[in-house]
Image (tube, rainbow, N blue to C red):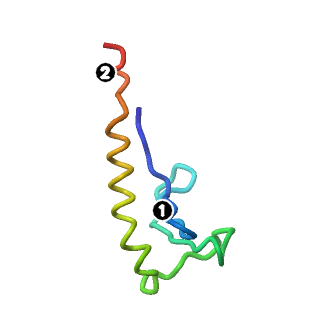
Amino acid sequence: MESELYGLKWNQFKMVFKKKKTLTDPALHNLDTDPKEREPIDYPYMHTSVGAHVPKLLEEFQERVSRIPSPSRRSA
């Protein structure tokens, strides 16, 4: 089983890594001010609290995925 992370959301912010199975440059959107995700936030002005949480959320995702048994281990 492959697990891919297309994006993550923290509070009103959403960081998108993939769109429709295509890698993109990560794009950060403020869903309160841009609910249709039309204009990403310019990174030099990215809210620092969001940037601080992204690595932790990615680490939690990887840790959870690693606990999912692979198909080969389930059939044994």
Residue 14 lies, in percent from the top left, at 53, 66
In this figure, which residue is indicated by the disc labeled 1? 24
Disc 1 residue type?
Thr
The disc at residue 9 is none
* Residue that sits furthest to the bottom in the current view: 45
Disc 2 residue type?
Arg
Q: Earlier in the sequence, mark 2 or mark 1?
A: 1
**Does dot 1 land on a helix, a strand or a loop?**
strand
The answer to which image quadrant residue 34 occupies is: bottom right
Return the residue nearer the eye: 6 or 60: 60
Pointers 2 and 1 in contact (C-beta within 8 Å): no
Image quadrant occupied by the N terminus: top left
**Labels in figure, total:** 2
**Does dot 2 land on a helix, a strand or a loop?**
helix
Image quadrant occupied by the C terminus: top left
In this figure, which residue is indicated by the disc labeled 2? 73
Residue 32 lies, in percent from the top left, at 65, 74
Return the residue nearer the eye: 28 or 22: 28
Residue 13 lies, in percent from the top left, at 54, 70
Question: Which residue is found at the position 42% from the left and 41% from the top?
Answer: 3
Around disc 1, counting alpha carbons within 10 Å, would you say few (fewer than 14), some (14 to 19), or many (20 or more)?
few
The span from disc 2 to disc 1 (Cα, nearest Å) is 33 Å
Question: Which residue is found at the position 50% from the left and 65% from the top?
Answer: 10
Around disc 2, counting alpha carbons within 10 Å, would you say few (fewer than 14), some (14 to 19), or many (20 or more)?
few
Question: Which residue is found at the position 56% from the left and 75% from the top?
Answer: 40
Question: Which residue is found at the position 35% from the left and 28% from the top?
Answer: 69
Please give left or right for residue 40 compared with residue 71 in the image: right
Please give left or right for residue 47 compared with residue 71 in the image: right
Residue 20 lies, in percent from the top left, at 57, 51
Please give left or right for residue 6 compared with residue 30 in the image: left
Residue 76 drawn above or below residue 55: above
Q: Nearer the viewer, mark 2 or mark 1?
A: 2
